[in-house]
Amino acid sequence: MIELKDVWKVYSNNVKAINGMTLKIDKGEFVYIVGPSGAGKSTFIRLLYREEKATKGEVIIDQTKLNSIKERHVPKLRRKIGVIFQDFKLLPTLTVYENVAFALEVIEEPRASIKRRVMEVLDIVKLKGKAKFLPDELSGGEQQRVAIARAIVNRPEVLIADEPTGNLDPDTAWGIMDILDDISHRGTTIIMATHNKSIVNTLKRRVIAIENGRVVRDEVRGNYGYEI
Ligand code: ADP
Ligand code: ADP
């Protein structure tokens, strides 16, 4: 499903963020990416949805080599990949419904099917009752759930999460994990960069630890392995 073959990423300021990374993630896996600040986790994540291009090596998603796709094909790739962030990135002037529908409107889905899909995913994230709210009328956890709904509304094969619980209190963070668990059980591959030690050590899954842009640990049911 996802494969990196000897991937290197050097930023234009000469920072070497990823230094020869090789790994495979199978369809349906739920993987935590851990490591200290500056280790290269976000860069790794951005390589996966082609926000950044590898300097050398291959990033392959579902048989597509990301380095060789043309700019005009990037939107099509992104339809296979949902992304959520620590800071939600919702459009503040659009309602919950509109934030989620947006991703389907740009691909010109028929209106009736948009409505059905949006209500389906709002149900999954338990926000059907708040479809008409604006983002700033919601709690942080609710905003993240809208972001999750937006990310999965295209039925992507992969959901990528960069510190999805980073801005949330512990209870709310666990609520987000419940939803990610549910999405994982529906067959979506999930890759989640996180600093949340208690989540990683409790909801045991594959852990890939990155330090200095390299994989230093890859365990089937791993631990967080750092103090904070
Ligand atoms: P992490 O997510 O683990 O904190 P990052 O991938 O953000 O790590 O950063 C890895 C290294 O790359 C750091 O040294 C960081 O300063 C650098 N870096 C990250 N993004 C950029 C960028 N857009 N331009 C230049 N350097 C960057
Ligand atoms: P840009 O790459 O210039 O930020 P995009 O249209 O690619 O513009 O992305 C717009 C916003 O949506 C950005 O914040 C981006 O990180 C985010 N984004 C991109 N792809 C996805 C995706 N598949 N799912 C969710 N959010 C995405």
Image (cartoon, grey):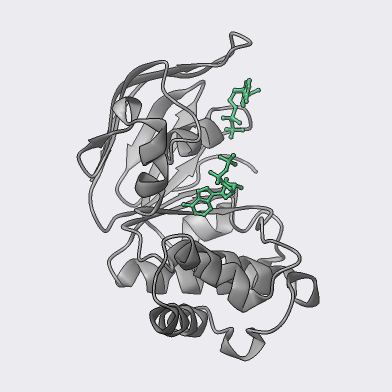
Residue 69 at what x, y percent from top left? 32, 31
Disc tally is 0
Q: Is residue 156 left or right of residue 44?
A: left
Question: Farthest bottom residue?
Answer: 129
Residue 165 at what x, y percent from top left? 62, 58
Q: Is residue 222 shown to the viewer in this render?
A: no
From the viewer's side, name the closer residue of 73 and 142.
73
Residue occupying the point 48% across, 39% down: 45
Residue 102 at what x, y percent from top left? 55, 66
Residue occupying the point 23% across, 54% down: 27
Question: Farthest left residue?
Answer: 63
Residue 3 at what x, y percent from top left? 26, 35
Residue occupying the point 35% across, 60% down: 156
- 121 vs 82: above or below: below
Q: Is residue 26 shown to the viewer in this render?
A: yes
In the picture, the quarter occupied by the C terminus is: top right
- 79 vs 69: above or below: below
Q: Quadrant of residue 207?
A: top left
From the viewer's side, name the closer residue of 72 and 211.
72
From the viewer's side, name the closer residue of 208 and 88.
88
- 18 vs 75: above or below: above
Question: Farthest top residue?
Answer: 14
Q: Is residue 62 left or right of residue 217?
A: left
Residue occupying the point 23% across, 49% down: 26
